[in-house]
Image (spheres, helix red, strand yellow):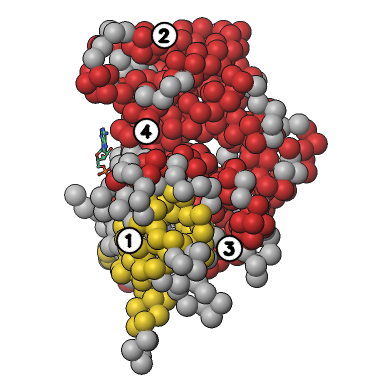
């Protein structure tokens, strides 16, 4: 399919002969990512105490403007750049230096300036500190080419060290991971995946040897390490003599470079040649006697590193919601500019319908994600109830897997909404789809998280806590005339509970885990949409109620044929 050239009479041509003018298409434009996001602004107005929002909103407006302006421009200018690995210098010395792109260097500065890993540790907003942080992340993410990847691991490492109780390491690393001084700030990697398995971490082959000098040294190969330029990492290795499986692994702290700046017993074998996230320097690392410190005991490493996963999965959910919103906002703006069949796309009923369906998914993903964020903030501030703590444990994998799947579908639809332009590299659009595709893969794939959720000991309690929270949402929805939407959400959750309680063998249980998890996720999103509509008023209520109806039509209960 080709787009027609515009043929128009030229005023400069004697006799008014027709000339072929080049076809010029109007690219989508960005408004302030914060002030133009009605759902986000309305949500914060309802959630946060008035004075608190008044105090922090200027920062959202500032970052929203920067993201739509200078950062988006830099992102476009940086389009063809990629990190470069130099393994050897001109004189034969092994250096393994990785040069990052200008966008990433700027993103690093902006991340420290906005305190993207500082805010939740400063706790100025008490239980709302995570909300403040993740609103900033939501605005920052779509224009910084996945710089959120090292930030997520940095936040996760800080949390993991704090929960480990290792005072020396907390004192050494946490201020650097969570500080606002650009000269002293660090990022962290997490090195878990080996060629033997990313999901099956228990099969890791890296070993840890305790030397006569009392120092641990690691030997092995880490197959995917995304923050290859970080100053430190948390990793898993098996102390010599330990048994097989996850419990035989210990968690180690590694400072990647010595005082002279040389990598400490680490070789960067190569950077991965990836479908997307190409600004992220994802490396294969050879650990060849890497000095390391035990963080918390010589066994139980997979359990000790869980806080890392809790945090990175939350970041993943925020990034999924953020990419979805961004893709939709670009497509919606373009629909006002692009004319087909004599009308802007936005005036064509089916195109409008298509974009509205995407918007409904964006809104559902946003509300589920920010419920998770709210619960995380409450837990860290020590004000979560027991039920909220149980719910947080369920929602962490649930939100990650639900939004990860939604994001790929929504971004793909938004790309299609640009027609051929969405497939052309220098529009800057295709990268959005490629980068989104990683979200269901890393930090646990959809299947692995579905099983993780289903097989956890407290799953029944988690589902009960979810039903309770959804019940509250549904009561609110009823007061706004959204009883039918509330019923769908409740019925789907009841179906999921019945499925969970049914007597079935292990194989059938595992086979249905994804449908079970996605039913929980979609039912919760629907209930939250209905609740949010009920709490809004006027045209905003009508808009969100319409999104809730739309979301419901797209399908919520994936288990209906199994009961
Ligand atoms: C760009 C990128 C960057 C990354 N960065 C890092 C990093 O910094 N640090 C790090 O540690 N890792 C990193 N990873 C690795 C990532 O976390 C793993 O790739 C991921 O966890 C999946 O593991 P795997 O590749 O071994 O896939 P596998 O575990 O082999 O999975 C393959 C397929 O099998 C399915 N599967 C696996 N087990 C089951 C089961 N029991 N039941 C049903 N289905 C199952 C999975 O869902 C998947 O679809 C990165 C990956 C990518 C793509």
* Marked residue nearer the N-terminal end (1 or 4): 1
Can you tell which mark lies on residue 186?
Answer: 3
Q: Position of residue 226 (x, y in %)?
A: 41, 58
Quadrant of res 154: bottom right
* Marked residue nearer the N-terminal end (3 or 2): 3
* Marked residue nearer the N-terminal end (4 or 2): 4
Q: Nearer the viewer, mark 1 or mark 4?
A: 1
Q: Is residue 76 above or below residue 470?
A: below
Q: Residues within 10 Å of mark 1 (few under 14, many from 20)?
A: some
* Marked residue nearer the N-terminal end (3 or 4): 3
Q: Nearer the viewer, mark 2 or mark 1?
A: 1
Frontmost residue, 183 versus 27: 183
Is 437 on the left or on the right of 149, as rendered?
left
Q: Nearer the viewer, mark 1 or mark 3?
A: 1
Q: Is residue 307 above or below residue 485?
A: below
Secondary structure beneath disc 3?
loop
Q: Nearer the viewer, mark 3 or mark 2?
A: 3
Cα–Cα span, label 3 and label 4: 29 Å
**Cβ atoms at labels 1 and 3 below 8 Å apart:** no
Cα–Cα span, label 1 and label 3: 24 Å
Q: Nearer the viewer, mark 4 or mark 2?
A: 4
- Ligand 1 is found in the corner quadrant, namely top left
Q: Which residue is mark 4?
A: 449
Q: Which residue is mark 2?
A: 494
Q: Is residue 81 above or below residue 129?
A: below
Cα–Cα span, label 1 and label 4: 26 Å
* Marked residue nearer the N-terminal end (1 or 3): 3
Q: Is residue 422 above or below residue 410?
A: below
Q: Which residue is mark 1?
A: 220
Question: Does the beta carbon of the residue at mark 4 sit less than 8 Å from ligand 1?
Answer: no
């Amino acid at each position: 399919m080709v787009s027609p050239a515009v043929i128009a009479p030229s005023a400069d041509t004697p006799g008014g002969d027709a000339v072929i003018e080049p076809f010029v298409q109007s690219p989508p434009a960005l408004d302030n990512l914060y002030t133009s996001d009605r759902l986000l602004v309305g949500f914060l107005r309802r959630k946060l105490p008035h004075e608190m929002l008044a105090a922090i909103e200027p920062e959202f407006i500032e970052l929203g403007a920067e993201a739509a302006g200078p950062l988006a421009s830099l992102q476009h200018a940086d389009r063809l750049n990629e990190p470069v690995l130099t393994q050897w210098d001109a004189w034969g010395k092994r250096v393994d230096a990785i040069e990052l792109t200008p966008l990433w260097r700027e993103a690093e500065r902006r991340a420290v300036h906005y305190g993207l890993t500082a805010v939740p540790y400063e706790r100025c907003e008490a239980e709302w500190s995570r909300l403040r942080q993740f609103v900033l992340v939501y605005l920052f993410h779509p224009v910084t080419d996945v710089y959120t990847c090292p930030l997520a691991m940095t936040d996760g490492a800080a949390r993991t060290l704090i929960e480990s109780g290792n005072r020396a390491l907390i004192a050494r690393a946490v201020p650097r991971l969570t500080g606002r001084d650009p000269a002293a700030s660090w990022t962290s990697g997490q090195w878990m995946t080996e060629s033997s398995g990313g999901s099956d971490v228990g099969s890791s082959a890296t070993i840890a040897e305790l030397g006569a000098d009392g120092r641990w040294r690691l030997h092995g190969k880490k197959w995917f390490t995304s923050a290859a330029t970080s100053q430190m990492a948390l990793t898993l290795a098996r102390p010599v003599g330990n048994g097989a499986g996850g419990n035989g692994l210990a968690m180690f702290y590694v400072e990647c470079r010595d005082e002279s700046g040389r990598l400490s017993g680490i070789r960067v074998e190569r950077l991965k040649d990836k479908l997307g996230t190409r600004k992220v320097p994802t490396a294969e690392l050879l650990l060849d006697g890497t000095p390391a410190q035990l963080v918390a005991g010589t066994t139980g490493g997979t359990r000790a590193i869980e806080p890392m996963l809790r945090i990175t999965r939350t970041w993943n959910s925020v990034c999924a919601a953020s990419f979805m919103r961004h893709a939709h906002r670009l497509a919606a703006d373009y629909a006002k500019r692009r004319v087909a069949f004599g009308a802007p796309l936005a005036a064509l009923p089916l195109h409008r319908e298509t974009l509205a369906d995407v918007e409904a998914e964006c809104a559902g993903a946003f509300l589920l994600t920010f419920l998770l964020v709210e619960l995380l903030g409450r837990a860290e501030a020590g004000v979560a109830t027991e039920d909220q703590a149980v719910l947080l444990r369920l929602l962490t994998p649930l939100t990650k897997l639900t939004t990860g799947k939604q994001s790929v579908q929504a971004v793909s639809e938004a790309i299609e909404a640009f027609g051929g332009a969405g497939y052309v590299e220098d529009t800057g659009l295709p990268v959005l789809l490629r980068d989104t595709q990683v979200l269901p893969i890393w930090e646990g794939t959809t299947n692995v998280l579905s099983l993780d959720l289903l097989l956890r000991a407290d799953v029944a309690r988690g589902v009960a806590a979810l039903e309770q929270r959804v019940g509250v949402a549904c009561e609110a929805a009823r007061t706004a005339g959204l009883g039918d939407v509330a019923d769908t959400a409740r019925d789907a959750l009841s179906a999921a509970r019945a499925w969970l309680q049914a007597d079935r063998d292990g194989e059938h249980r595992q086979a249905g885990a994804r449908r079970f998890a996605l039913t929980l996720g979609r039912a919760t999103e629907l209930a939250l949409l209905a609740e949010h509509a009920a709490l809004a008023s006027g045209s905003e209520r009508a808009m969100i109620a319409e999104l809730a109806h739309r979301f419901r039509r797209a399908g919520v209960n994936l288990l209906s044929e199994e009961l």
